[in-house]
Image (cartoon, helix red, strand yellow):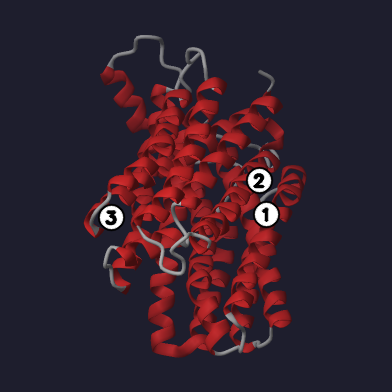
Amino acid sequence: MKPLSALAGLNTVGFLARFSYALARNPVLPLFALLLGAGPEGVGLVVGISTVTGILFKMPAGAASDVIGRKRTMLAGLFVFGLLPFAYLFIASYQALVAVRFAHGLATAIYGPVAMAVVAEMAGERRGEMLSWFSSVMIVGTLLGAPIGGFMLHHAPNAPAPGLWEYHLVFLMSGAAGMAALLLGLWLLRGPEAQVSAGLPPGASLTARLAIFRQGLREVLADRRVLLTSAMEGVQNLGMGALEAFLPIYAVTRAGLNELQAGLLWAVQIVVTMLAKPVLGRLGDAHGRKAPIAVGLFLCAAGLAAMPWLTGFLALSGAGLVFGLGEALVTSSSAALVADMCRKRHYGAAMGTFGTIFDVGHAAGPILGGLLVAALDFRLAFAVLAVILLVAIPVFLAGVDLESSPNGISIGNENS
């Protein structure tokens, strides 16, 4: 299969997988938790527990793909996408829901970083553009999954108080989309693994495989540039996570918007990010990746700091557009730059490390944002978050030297 055709196939699988995952997440998941008797703290735990799964498993899953092969690891993730949604049909308690959500999080934890490693390997000099297309397609799946799940509950026979059967219909659709992703993935990835990325010979011993696994993690974690670049994505996601949690509250309680307008504010940001990423990824491929990341962090900080000083839908939409453009600049270049700096045989470990730091930032954003809003109110809280993003810029620019690495790897320039 030609690289571009294979990448298009991977994008389709990614879309179906993320659509399946989003159907079972928002708004269905928190409402299902309420139906099972969860309080506010319980809802927060069940929504966030899958991010904990990502923090724990993305790095080892990515490194494992360097040793046992990308196909096997990706298929393991796709099996979780395909089968886990059906487990929701047997849930009868809140505790069971938490356990299933933790397990469901393995889908994105395993598949996500490995699929990114495959895209990075196949894209060559178009790495930034192709990784951005992959990410944008998955965003589309997420955007469609959430409203369709909500639509199914809203138009259920027992709406506005749907029962277990109505939720089960949503989970069945989630399972159908997950199975479609799995079956398409099985077809695309058919055939034996030609060669594992670490270059191990066929029939290598478990000891040899474990040694390469440890070596990959050591080399990636020892490279300050990889960690700093990944941290920029994490810092950007710190701001995004806080915004995701508290922009709707600010918009409704302080800015005079209704719930629909608050939702549209978030949509403005996501759509701008989704549309801009492939274009900005192509620019990064041609002109370098450090500058877009720095400019993107600055725009995210500006949009974040401005929001609690604004009222009205148009003004807040403008700030959201600035933040979304900044997010697109950061995310279209950060993963590609990590791949640029890493040995090809350790792409999986690099993407796993990247994903873990991404998830730490995303999980920390609402927590830190909540503490700051409670202590300082919206304006000062958002200003503190913006300062964190601004301080990260000189740290990144000074700390990421693209000429050499601790492992003796030289990429020559930003466009390698």
Discs 1/2, front: 1
Viewer-closest of 234 and 254: 254
What amino acid is at disc 3?
Val
Q: Which residue is mark 2?
A: 132
Secondary structure of the residue carrying tag 1 is: helix
**Residue occupied by mark 1:** 274
The residues bearing labels 3 and 1 have C-alpha atoms spaced at a distance of 30 Å
Where residue 338 sits in the image (x, y, percent)?
A: 55, 44
Closer to the camera, 119 or 157? 157
For numbered disc 3, what is the local secondary structure? helix
* Residue in the picture at 55% in, 84% down: 252
Residue topped by disc 3? 98
Quadrant of image for the N terminus: top right
| Left or right: 328, with 181 as reference point | right
x and y percentages locating residue 114 in the rendered image: 48, 35
> Compared with residue 65, is residue 273 higher up or lower down, i.e. above or below?
below
What type is the residue that disc 1 sits on?
Met
Q: Earlier in the sequence, mark 1 or mark 2?
A: 2
Point out the frontmost of discs 3 and 1: 3
Which quadrant would residue 359 be assigned to in this image? bottom left
Q: Secondary structure at mark 2?
A: helix
Q: CA distance from mark 2 to mark 3?
A: 32 Å
Residue 209 falls left or right of residue 324: left
Distance, label 1 to label 2, CA atoms, is 8 Å
Which residue is at the front of the view, 109 or 163?
163
